[in-house]
Image: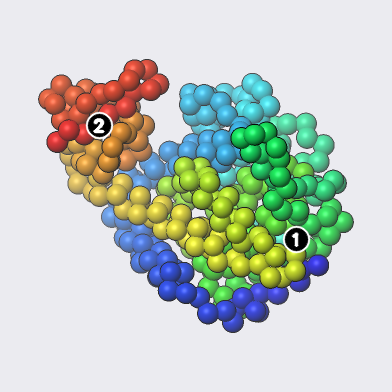
Amino acid sequence: MRNFDYAEINRQKWDSEVLGLVAAIYKETGKQEMYLKQRPEELEKLVEIAKIQSTEASNAIEGIVTTDTRIRQLVEQKTTPKNRSEQEIAGYRDVLSVIHENFDAIPITRNYILQLHKILYSHTNNPIAGQFKNVQNYISATYPDGHTEILFTPLAPYETPFALDRLCEEYNRVIGNLELEPLIAIPIFIHDFLCIHPFNDGNGRMSRLLTTLLLYRSGFYVGRYVSLEAKIAKNKDLYYDALGASQRGWHEGKDDPVPFIKYLLGTILAAYKDMADRFAIVEEKKSALETVRLATQYKIGRFTKQDIRELCPVLSLSSVEGALRKMVASGELRREGSGKNTCYVRLK
């Protein structure tokens, strides 16, 4: 079985793309610290939006969905779950809240990961919540003609507890001894976690929650303000392609984690750049119309009212709607569709 020795990874020569992504993320991290000092109250409003998006997107990747209104109510804890999907959404919300509030007091160990999994299923009657898988699982794909293909076979149940222990030990060792850059170690940990696939259910959601936890513990807080899960959901195929490319040869220790490292670092960097855009919009005091007008300048092609609201966290929904109506009336925007399908196109 794989030994999870990161010493060999530490000796690897990284290509210019990986090194460039790492350097760019550190540069953006410095900017984020500056934003927080300058306008902390505006950025704090991004937190609730990011929580809602993260909870919605991470569950949607697994086909767990409800309405926009219900998602908001569930995340804001203004309602109780009505069905199994909503129970799982509420569980994700709870784990995310624990991570947001206590990341520095959550060690990376088998027991803590099991506890987080138990919270994920705390609103359901899942008998194996917080327990390792008891049957062999497979990562498979279903194709348009209906046939299913096994893409990867994770570790067997009996191998799983030891493997997760080793993974955590090795990660903690290289991070604690400053032997491996955290932005390299984190994607490798998540990749190995997904290859172990330690649970009967919830592995994908747990991997995304652990990504947030590991980033926070290493000082990368962008996921607090911009949803990483939403970015992954928008490019789900790229996520699965990168994971698939990195998994080949994993059992024999001949895998190449670089495609997944590049994918995850690219996602993190894109989130930081989104945050810079949002800060630019709230940086100066402007009227609602001027704020929305500036936000539309960041959009190419069609965009929705929600897209603009995300960029303007200081504005109420009615203020955004009012500004968009004025811009349509003045000929700056064209409105297309109706109801839920309403979108806008910039004309000037």
Q: Which one is in front, 76 or 165?
A: 165
Furthest toward the left, the residue is: 330
Residue 243 vertical position relative to residue 168 in the rendered view, above or below: above
Q: Position of residue 307 (x, y in %)?
A: 35, 35
* Residue furthest to the bottom: 11
- Front-lying residue, 108 or 4: 4
Label 2 secondary element: strand
Q: Residue at x 73, y 31 (%)?
A: 124
| Mark closest to the chain's N terminus, 2 or 1 | 1
Q: Is residue 226 left or right of residue 315?
A: right
Residue under circle 2? 345
Q: For residue 11, which quarter of the picture? A: bottom right
Residue drawn at point x = 60 percent, y = 59 percent:
245
Q: CA distance from mark 2 to mark 1?
A: 49 Å
Q: Residues within 10 Å of mark 2 (few under 14, many from 20)?
A: some
Left/right of residue 321 with respect to residue 245 in the rendered view: left
Q: Amino acid at mark 1?
A: Leu
Q: Which mark is residue 164?
A: 1
Placement of 203 over or under 180, stated as above or below = above
Residue at 32% in and 33% down: 303
Determine crowd level at label 1: few under 14, some 14-19, many 20+ residues with C-alpha closer than 10 A. Answer: many
Q: Is residue 131 left or right of residue 233?
A: right
